[in-house]
Structure formats: C-alpha cells, structure tokens
Image (cartoon, rainbow, N blue to C red):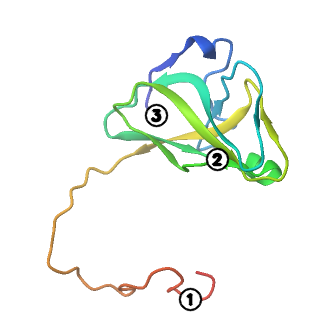
C-alpha cells in the first residue's frame, strides 16, 4: 500500500476524503464538492469539482472512471473516461460528467460521482523501426478476431 498526500480545498470542507466502499474495491469514491445542486440536462455535461488535490508519487497515475450505478440507473458517466491525473499535477481533481440519459440528473453535494484508481505507469520509450515483427493477429483491427469483436 502506498500513502498519497491529499489536500482538502476550502470548498471540500465537511466532505469525506476518497475511500473504498469495501475492503476489496479497486477504486476510491470521488465526491461532488458543489456549492449547490448541478442539474445535467439530457446530453448536458459539466466539470464537477471534488474539493481535493493529490500528490501522486512518481511512476503512478490516477485514473478517474465512471461509477457503474450512475451509468446503469441514470445514464450518467465520465466523459473522458478514464481521465488521467499525472503524478506532477497538483491542482484540484475535477470530473467531467455527461448525462446520456433521457431525463435531467441532479448532482448533489457529497454524492459519489466517480471512482479513482491509482495505477503504476510503465516507463516506456518508442523506438522507430522499418517494420514490426509478425504476430498472429497482424494488422487485423476492429472486429477482426471473430464474431462479437
């Protein structure tokens, strides 16, 4: 387990820090740090503040992912999923929500709006070559692996 410094911003006062819903949950729940209700019309989107900033260790990233319950029940998801939080970013974590549902959705203060996954980032460099080594799949793209995808 790694310890990650978190700064609670003024508008996040009174809200819980991100935590796992269960012991084996992969993600930490991110909460809406809105001053008042934010209504997302069908097709509407908004940047929702979380009231926190992080200091991720080098070699790690934060991935902001949707909550399955919001997606299934309301059609609300994270627009740029997964959103990436780089290790050198020190600003507030924001979540871009979009309402793909058919009715307006209200984001309320303290509501769980997304989940944060902490992941290790591979240190990779690209090396230009004249051709790539062969593979079983080759250049087959979308739908090339058989029925259903």
The residue that mark 1 highlights is: 146
Q: Relative to residue 27, is residue 106 drawn left or right?
A: right
Image x and y of residue 35, in percent: 70, 18
Closer to the camera in the image, 144 or 19: 144
Residue neighbourhood size for the residue with mark 1, other residues' Cα within 10 Å, grouped as few (<14), some (14–19), many (≥20): few
Image x and y of residue 102, in percent: 83, 53
Check the image and report above or below for 28 versus 145.
Answer: above
Q: Residue at x 42, y 85 (%)?
A: 140
The residue that mark 3 highlights is: 1
The residue that mark 2 highlights is: 66
Q: Secondary structure at mark 2?
A: loop
| Quadrant where the image shows the C terminus | bottom right
Check the image and report above or below for 142 versus 100.
Answer: below
Q: Residue at x 55, y 50 (%)?
A: 81
Mark 2 and mark 3 in contact? Answer it, CB < 8 Å. Answer: no
Query: What is the distance, in whole Å, between disc 1 and disc 2 at their CAs?
Result: 29 Å
Image x and y of residue 124, in percent: 25, 54
């Amino acid at each position: 387990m790694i310890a990650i410094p978190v700064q609670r911003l003024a508008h996040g006062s009174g809200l819980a820090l991100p935590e796992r819903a269960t012991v084996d949950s992969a993600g930490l729940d991110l909460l809406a740090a809105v001053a008042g209700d934010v209504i997302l019309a069908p097709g509407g989107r908004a940047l929702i503040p979380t009231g926190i900033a992080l200091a991720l260790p080098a070699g790690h990233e934060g991935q902001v992912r949707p909550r399955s319950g919001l997606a299934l029940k309301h059609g609300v998801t994270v627009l740029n999923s997964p959103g990436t939080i780089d290790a050198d970013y020190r600003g507030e974590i924001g979540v871009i929500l979009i309402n793909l549902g058919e009715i307006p959705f209200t984001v309320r203060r303290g509501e769980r709006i997304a989940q944060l996954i902490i992941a290790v980032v591979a240190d990779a460099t690209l090396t230009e070559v004249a051709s790539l080594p062969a593979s079983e799949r080759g250049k087959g793209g979308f739908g090339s692996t058989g029925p259903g995808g």
